[in-house]
Image: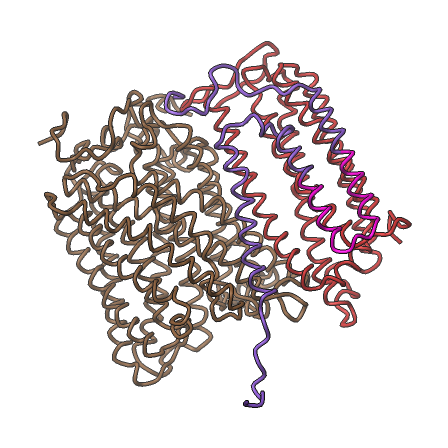
Amino acid sequence: MSSHSTAENYQGPPHVHHMDAPTAYSAAKLGMWLFLATEILLFGGLFAAFALFRWMYLEAFEHASQQLAWGWGALNTLVLLFSSFTAAMAVEAAQKGNNQRVFRLLAITIGCGFIFLIIKFIEYRAKYVHGIWPSSAEWNDPQFNAHYKSFFGLYFCMTGLHALHVILGMGLLAWALRKARVNRYSKEYYTPVEVGALYWHLVDLIWIYLFPLLYLVGHPSWHTPFGH
Amino acid sequence: MSHSHSDSHGQGLGHIVPASIFKKVFATLVFLTIVTVAVSLVDLGSMNIVVAMLVASCKALLVALFFMHLKYENPLTWVYAFFPILLLATLLGGVFIDNPMRHAPAPLSAPAK
Amino acid sequence: MSDTQHNTQGDYLHNPSGLWSWVTTTDHKRIGLMYLFTILLFFFVAGISALIMRTELAHAGPDFLKAQQYNVLFTLHGALMIFLFIVPGIPATLGNFLIPLMIGAKDVAFPRLNLLSYYIYVIGAIIAVIAVIPPVETLSFLKSLGFTGPADTGWTFYAPYSLDTGAAIPWMVFAAFVLGFSSILTGLNFIVTIHKLRAPGMTWDRLPVFIWGSYATAVIQTLATPVVGITLLLVIMERLMGVGIFDAKLGGDPVLYEHMFWFYSHPVVYIMVLPAFGIVGEIIPVFSRKPLFGYKMVCYASLAIAIVGFFVWAHHMFVAGISDFSAIAFSVITFGVAVPTAVKVFNWVSTMYKGSISFTTPMLYAMGFVFLFMVAGTTGIFLATLAVDVFYHDTYFVVAHFHYTIQGGAVIGLMAGLHFWFPKITGKMYNELAGKIGWVLVFAGFNLTFIPQFILGMEGMPRRYFDYLPQFQPMHMLSTVGSFINGFGYTFALLNLFYAAMFSKVKAPANPWNSLSLEWKTASPPITENFAETPIVTEGTYNYGRPVEGLAH
């Protein structure tokens, strides 16, 4: 599976010894869809736990949810939706062999990933300052609401795992972007852009559920979009 | 090697979704995000989570169908896109027919009657 | 890379040559062999730990182990056997070797991913091994890294034991997580391979049943493993960060751990045994010289078992305090698994009926498998029955039942497959008489070990106890004697194969068993690219008993 991508002119799909190019393309895509299925179930365990504890400790969960800054969450939702949009456009550009456009669109997508992480960092920091942080002194204080340990425990696990996936997705897109730089894509070969974008959309999909579940269903206040 | 399976296309690789569709989908997604935030600021009691999850599922479906090209994929991809969701529903079902339906055992010192 | 790499017609064992070409290989056949040696190493270690336990249990009363050491040993035995040996046991070894050959492909869909999954397995194995090292002075630096002693919770890592023990649980479950990731990548690779790389004419209704079994297995590997992955990560988070998920002290729910754990770990028994079903389905028609009876039903039954297997997990939790309704529901659904499983047994037996049976070693293992799995299945029905399980739960009856499924099913299936495909893998023939002696030892030793354990369980002997009441003495003694015969049998049988692979002068023909499936149509051992030219399939795999061209006489 060698791709000597030095030439600027057209190369066609990379040669693979054990299958032809259309098979390689559809195999890569099926492989990515299967991987996404595993990701859904990986997060699924967290969603199941969240559903159960929300049912068990409804009041505490709603109260805890109000301490999250839904304004930042909404902004991050828009950032990720936009990045998903540019990733989808990048696939279309790649399918038409427009490598420059692929490069630009993927760069925007990765940039959105950075913005997402920065906003997430601002949110985490606000929580850290208030002592809502696993194993902080406040957290380990017996006075600390035990059900907060479930809510914020899940909050940090879910958003932390999601942020990890954002980083992985950015890496995957950066790999796809590098090939656009050397004009690797044509209508016969654009697999990296497509599988990279698929992965990125999943990151978006998970966030589409995380945002309302964590930030919105606890009756947030209009007056404090960015926290207290 | 494509002889034996019907799920590969004759020529070209995948379906090209025009950019105009992506723009419309993106606009709808932004609109739905505003809707879900707006609704959450109104206290609907236990209906809030129902609305929030319905809107989220609409958004997720839009992303999957158009951004991820699922609408143009073969049945096999559909199976592997939705089977994990079925399994997740199973896990949730298994957890929720257990915990909420448990009842505390009768106290040992209950008076015999 | 040397020029020999381009010699795709040479045999895969020697072409290309050199150690480096092995550790960097993307050839599915070599990766399968690398897996085989690695898992057999852990089979040996975990087997030894079982024998140490059986020695302690030969007599009532503490002999040479302390209770805590016993806890560590049964955890070690379970965790190594499950995560390091039998989950990758058949799929990663014979599955890797055979799937491309059987469907007429040159390799799996993602050869580099295949190699990556092997090394992820190795990393997971190394972490697991370090995590079970007892704390000693000379290795005190390990302690500061969180390796605080071998796990003592049982392989299930139930909360709250796993949250409260001082042992190195975070590392141990992290090892299981890494191993699970390797398993996911293997399963994903196989699903894509079977969908996309079948040779022309190899339609789904011509696929060998081993492929159907491996496909069903791969679905479970891919879709069940992530749930246990996140569960184990949550255990780590709970231990290190004090988040409240499974620990009742922190507001968590320990039963939720069991739900999420068994959501994977019940289907995982089908990861172990479905490929073994496939192996037996390949062997029985060949040595009965009859078409596989009810081929389609055998195939659909594999998928049915895989799917129904996802809906029965809480039958492991009948006494964990789950609601009455869910206990009844899961009990009823569990009976459903018996249907496709019984269909398979009927099909194997019907295939042998009036067949021209030759009792070769692989056939003996396959027939032994059918018998042992029958015992496993029928005792499984007892345990699925809610009212009965309340008494049998956590007794030796359960221990015996799952050893019949996992050892009597998966391991015997693996042994059958190793003997059957040995000529293809190595290009040599093993000593048939020694193979049969090995089978007798394994089969007799196995039954002598575990039949007494059924009786012990019915009498009330609880599992995971290092001591017992004097009335259990005779059965424990029998079981210990059996376990040593069993262990000796495996050693003997595997050494016979190893000896033949290294030193045998008897070259295997391309198709020593006169089988009709594709892997026998290439040389023994196969060439690097599997087939000189892509085969074209024109008929099903099991047309035995009819005049067929090209068979040796």
Q: Name the main secondary structure of what is drawn in magenta.
A: helix
Most foreground residue, C125 or C269: C269
Give whichever of C157, C387 is nearer the camera. C387
Q: Taking C487 as reference, is B37 left or right?
A: right
* Chain C image colour: brown
Residue C402, x across and y down, in percent: 35, 62
- Chain displayed in red: A
- Residue C305 lies left or right of residue B28; in this view the side is left
Question: Going 43% across and 30% down the picture, which residue do you hit?
Answer: C109
Left of C69 or right of it: where is C213? left
**Residue lying farthest to the front in this orientation:** B113
In the depicted structure, whether residue C165 falls above or below residue A197: below
The residue segment tinted magenta is B30-57
Colouring rule applied to residues: by chain
Quadrant in the picture for residue B72 = top right
Up the image or down, C428 lies above or below C240; here it is above
What is the x, y in percent for residue B1? 38, 21
**Chain letter, colour purple:** B
Image position of C239 with respect to B29: above or below: below
Relative placement, left or right, of B93 versus A216 is left
**Residue C475 magenta-drawn?**
no
Where is residue B27 drawn, in percent x and y?
Answer: 76, 29
Furthest residue in direction right, as rendered: A223
Count of numbered labels shown in the rendering: 0
Res C312 quadrant in image: bottom left
* Magenta stretch holds residue B53: yes
Farthest residue in the top direction?
A: A9
> Which corner quadrant holds the C terminus of chain A?
bottom right
Q: Could you tell me residue A53's position as x and y percent?
A: 67, 61
Q: Quadrant of residue B102?
A: bottom right
Choose between A194 and C216: the one closer to the eye: C216
Residue placed most toward the observer, C492 or A27: A27
